[in-house]
């Protein structure tokens, strides 16, 4: 009996290196044969001796899983946890490459059952809202704006990120910083920023808007009045020809105006589609901002006019 245990352990050690997926992809024994050999070696081992073998078998079974089976398991985990899963976590769980997991997520997204996030996924039914549709609109442009704007942040800063759909795309690019304090009224950035060990995250209190996924109201305004930030990052619904920054709701305009006042430096994040868009409540002007990060599709004449009001930094995907 001891010989059988030793044989099984040796097989497991031989069969499961630190990266089993890579080992098998290099043309080593077929996965089905691997499982069969392990089962044969473990067949007559008492249950109290089989714990290590069982762990190995679970890994081996994951390796032979077909894509649809793996995708069903991913969905089951998302339903059970009701939270975001990262590509890295899933690749480790199923002993496959990150590229394989990304292909799985692409298929699940095409089936409209998940939403992709920066580095992972969430259930569409869990978080789908008007806000997430806005985040997904012009995704690559907004991602490029967020990546460029991250250069304005330094380790040790205290910053504010508002609930704008373009401002959301700043959050994933802050993970390399240390001792960074981030205040926000956006619930969407919480799962992104909470993964970064160097970020201390503060959520502004107030009333929850379930459609737009943010916090607002008088409590939020009162909290902001007692805070001061090194840099404030704001979005906008529209920028008109006179350089006014507008939103569609008076209460949101008042909140944005307070945020604007609390920053030593103020950065506007808004792509080219906001130029000439419809909104009717002014909360500030381009001249109130130190920098405006935008996309490279603004009319050249308008761009020159805007550059006279603030520093415009144009980025491309």
Image: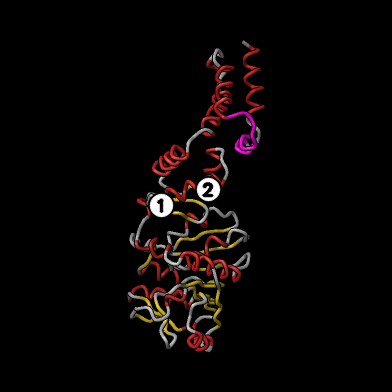
Q: Which residue is mark 1?
A: 110
Q: Is residue 73 left or right of residue 230?
A: left
Magenta region: which residues? 20-30
Q: In the image, what residue occupies the spot 54% across and 27% down?
A: 32
Q: Is residue 224 left or right of residue 315?
A: left
Q: Nearer the viewer, residue 262 or 292?
A: 292
Percent of width and height locating residue 104: 48, 46
Of labels 2 and 1, earlier in sequence is 2
Q: In the image, what residue occupies the spot 40% across and 84% down?
A: 240
In the image, residue 165 lies in the stretch drawn in magenta: no
Q: Which image quadrant for residue 259?
A: bottom left
The circle on residue 87 is 2
Q: Which image quadrant for residue 249?
A: bottom left
Q: Which image quadrant for residue 21?
A: top right
Percent of width and height locating residue 223: 43, 68
Percent of width and height locating residue 76: 41, 40
Q: In the image, what residue occupies the spot 59% across and 29% down?
A: 30
Query: What secondary structure is found at the residue carrying circle 2?
Result: helix
Q: In the image, what residue occupies the spot 64% across and 34% down?
A: 27
Q: Are marks 2 and 1 in contact (CB under 8 Å)?
A: no
**Circle 2 crowding by C-alpha within 10 Å: few under 14, some 14–19, many from 20:** many
Q: Is residue 167 above or below residue 193?
A: below
């Amino acid at each position: 009996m001891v010989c059988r245990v030793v044989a099984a352990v040796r097989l497991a050690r031989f069969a499961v290196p630190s990266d089993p997926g890579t080992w098998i992809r290099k043309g080593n024994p077929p996965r089905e044969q691997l499982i069969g050999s392990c089962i044969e070696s473990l067949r007559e081992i008492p249950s109290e001796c089989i714990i290590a073998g069982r762990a190995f078998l679970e890994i081996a079974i994951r390796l032979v899983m077909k894509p649809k089976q793996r995708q069903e398991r991913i969905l089951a985990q998302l339903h059970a946890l009701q939270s975001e899963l990262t590509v890295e976590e899933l690749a480790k769980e199923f002993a496959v490459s990150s590229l394989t997991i990304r292909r799985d997520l692409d298929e699940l997204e095409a089936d409209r059952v998940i939403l992709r996030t920066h580095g992972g996924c969430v259930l569409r039914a869990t978080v789908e809202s008007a806000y997430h549709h806005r985040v997904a609109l012009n995704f690559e442009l907004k991602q490029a704006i967020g990546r460029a704007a991250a250069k304005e942040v330094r380790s040790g800063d205290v910053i504010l990120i508002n609930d704008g759909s373009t401002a959301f795309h700043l959050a994933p690019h802050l993970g390399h910083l240390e001792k960074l304090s981030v205040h926000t009224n956006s619930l969407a950035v919480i799962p992104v920023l909470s993964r970064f060990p160097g970020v201390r995250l503060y959520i502004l209190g107030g009333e929850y808007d379930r459609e737009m996924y943010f916090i607002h109201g008088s409590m939020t305004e009162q909290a902001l009045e007692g805070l001061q930030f090194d840099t404030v990052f704001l979005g906008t619904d529209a920028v008109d020809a006179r350089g006014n920054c507008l939103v569609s709701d008076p209460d949101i305009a008042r909140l944005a105006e307070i945020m604007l006042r609390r920053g030593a430096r103020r950065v506007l994040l808004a792509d080219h589609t906001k130029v000439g868009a419809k909104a009717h409540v002014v909360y500030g002007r381009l001249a109130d901002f130190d920098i405006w990060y935008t996309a490279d599709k603004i009319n050249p004449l308008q761009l020159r006019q805007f550059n006279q009001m603030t520093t415009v930094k144009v980025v491309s995907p």
